[in-house]
Amino acid sequence: MSAHTQQEFKTFMSQLQTTNQSLDFFCDFDKISQNVQEIKLSLCTLNSLIGAQDMRAAVEAIWRRDKSAFSVMDILIAVRSEGKKAVLNSLNKCVILDSLFASVDGVMEFLENTGLKEIFQKQKIKNLVDYVFGIETGLDSNARKNRSGHVMENVIDNLLTQNGIIHRKEIFSSEWPKLSHELGSDEKRFDFVVETKQKVYLIEVNFYSGGGSKLNEVARSYSDLAPKINSVAGFEFVWITDGIGWLSAKNKLEEAYYNIPKVYNLTDIKEFIQIVKTEGQN
């Protein structure tokens, strides 16, 4: 017997949202500010290079006073050298970027070949602290892909909390030995666990704003996982998913929807919340 009707699936698809990103998704300004603060003193020291016509003399003056200030210069070209980035030097030899900051000649090579010397001399940059804040903002925007994987989890976390639903995050299946017989030796991590007086709900959440082969695999995987969990008394699998990316994988989602009793999106998640409240929690 199908877990849902065709009409229910049509309604589900019509409710899919374009995005789950709020304005605070785009930049983590606390992180950006912290990154700038950690190197602010060095940047203030390097500010003396701005407007210097005799750049080598200005570099040597800083070198004599605090040569460690040059160690932060990789960020001036939007690079972090923690990973020891390799570059070609003026002799066309492969060197580690931050090795250039170990000598005055290396610093001069960096400034000249990156174009920063001309930028500084023409004062196209007024203050390196403000300039690096801008760079950090740009680099943080590149980290959005990493953050996007957690956005849906945060949305569900907040919804459960706001509705007074007691829940736990990132829980492994090994916590319940009786699941091992059905799930096999592979340990499964669930995004959330909600326990009521009647059941333990093991929850997976995701959001797809774009298509791709991964969606088909996810739907297929959960279609296989749900019956195994649901066959164990007192346990049930819950899948909360959304996003117009599913329009490109509609067929596989439909198969999963008919196979998994508890599939929700951000619109009808209120139905699951009501179930939990009705069953009650300890």
Image: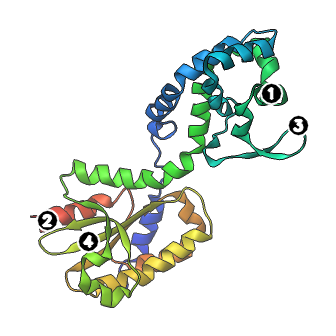
- Amino acid, disc 4: Tyr
Mark drawn on residue 105: 1
- Amino acid, disc 1: Asp
Q: From the viewer's perspective, is 216 left or right of 266?
A: right
Quadrant of the drawing holding the N terminus = bottom left
Q: Which residue is mark 4?
A: 201
For the residue labelled by badge 4, is the local secondary structure a helix, a strand or a loop?
strand
CB of mark 1 within 8 Å of CB of mark 4?
no
Could you tell me which residue is drawn at 62 percent across and 66 percent down?
212
For the residue labelled by badge 1, is the local secondary structure a helix, a strand or a loop?
helix
Distance from disc 2 to disc 3, alpha carbons, whole Å, reads 71 Å
Could you tell me which residue is drawn at 61 percent across and 63 percent down?
211
Could you tell me which residue is drawn at 20 percent across and 61 percent down?
274
Q: Which residue is mark 3?
A: 90
On the image, the x and y values in percent for residue 68 come to 61, 27
Distance from disc 1 to disc 4, alpha carbons, whole Å, reads 63 Å
Distance from disc 2 to disc 4, alpha carbons, whole Å, reads 14 Å
On the image, the x and y values in percent for residue 271 come to 27, 62
Distance from disc 4 to disc 3, alpha carbons, whole Å, reads 61 Å
Say which label, 1 or 2, has the lower sequence index.
1
Say which label, 2 or 3, has the lower sequence index.
3
CB of mark 4 within 8 Å of CB of mark 3?
no
Picture quarter containing residue 181? bottom left
- Amino acid, disc 2: Thr
Quadrant of the drawing holding the C terminus = bottom left
Is residue 24 visible in the rendered image? The answer is: yes
Q: From the viewer's perspective, is 29 left or right of 90?
A: left
In the displayed image of the protein, which residue is found farthest to the left? 282
Q: From the viewer's perspective, is 34 left or right of 136?
A: left
Distance from disc 1 to disc 2, alpha carbons, whole Å, reads 73 Å
Q: Which residue is mark 2?
A: 278
